[in-house]
Amino acid sequence: MITTILTAMLIVGIVGLFIGVFLGAAGIRFHVEADEKEEAVLNALPGNNCGGCGFPGCAGLASAIAKGEAPVNACPVGGEETGKVIAGIMGVEEVAGTKKTAYVACQGTCDKAGVDYAYTGIEDCRMLSFVPNGGAKSCEYGCLGYGSCVKVCPFDAIHVVDGVAVVDKDACKACGKCVEVCPKHLISLIPYDAPYMVACSSKQKGVDTMKACSVGCIGCGICKKNCPHEAVTVESFCASIDPEKCQGCGICEQKCPKKSIQAH
């Protein structure tokens, strides 16, 4: 009996020794040298793994930067300061980037937007595409107000106020998660210092927009006609402002008969 036990212990010991030697040899044979720059870049990144850079998390971005496949300021969360640190690690000059923030192109609050019926059900904007008119609000292009964008924001930068999502541009890191989740495509990333924006996304004719919302853009073109910098265009009955051309004179806001244009 004792002999059997000792024999079993010996066999287990030999097998364990063999496995240890095999794993050690394999580790040496297949060892991959760590890229010191990649590790340094990864340590410089904020670690949110939000995917706002377009890569699979901070590790993916660090690898891309180390290989020269992404700019040193590609992290929207870290911003300019992180870009400077990474530029130092990579030994390159930082490329100046435009600070961005998310913007919700709608101001159809409860007192301004009409409602066609009382909705009771799952409070998720994405699910409302299955109900009549895509939601209870009269404007089929307006913010539904059930906060799918709020739920995915990792920075607590967006909240629903009086039935409409509102972005805190100082808290926003422009990761783009809210942009991706909005079923109405109302949210976009714009320059942080954009002077004025059209707070409407309606593509309905003016007469229909006026029935649905008191502050909806009716596509009248008055803003376009009065803009001295040709920064305003009107397409599909809705105006839009080019932030790069806009000089912040405010004439468009003053002339808009529906107050659809807001200072940002």
Image: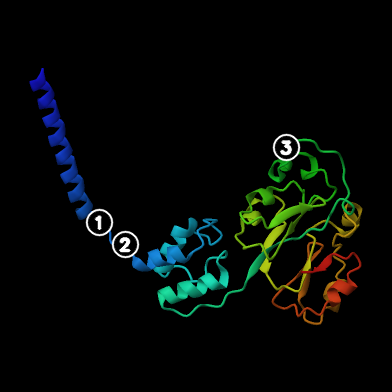
Q: Residue at x 17, y 50 (%)?
A: 25
Of circles 1 and 3, which is in front? 1
Check whether the beta carbons of the residues at disc 2 and disc 1 lie within 8 A of each other: no
Residue labelled with disc 2: 34
Q: Relative to 119, does residue 237 appear above or below in the rendering?
A: below
| Secondary structure category for the residue under label 2 | loop
Residue labelled with disc 1: 31
* Quarter of the figure that contains the C terminus: bottom right
Whether residue 73 sits left or right of residue 207 in the image: it is left
- Image disc number at residue 122: 3
Characterize the local packing of mark 2: few (<14), some (14-19) or many (20 or more) Cα atoms within 10 angstroms. Answer: few
Amino acid type, label 2: Ala
User: Which one is nearer the viewer's eye here, 252 or 52?
Assistant: 52
Residue furthest out toward the front: 2
Q: Position of residue 142 (x, y in %)?
A: 79, 53
| Secondary structure category for the residue under label 3 | loop
Q: Earlier in the sequence, mark 1 or mark 3?
A: 1
Q: Position of residue 72 (x, y in %)?
A: 48, 71
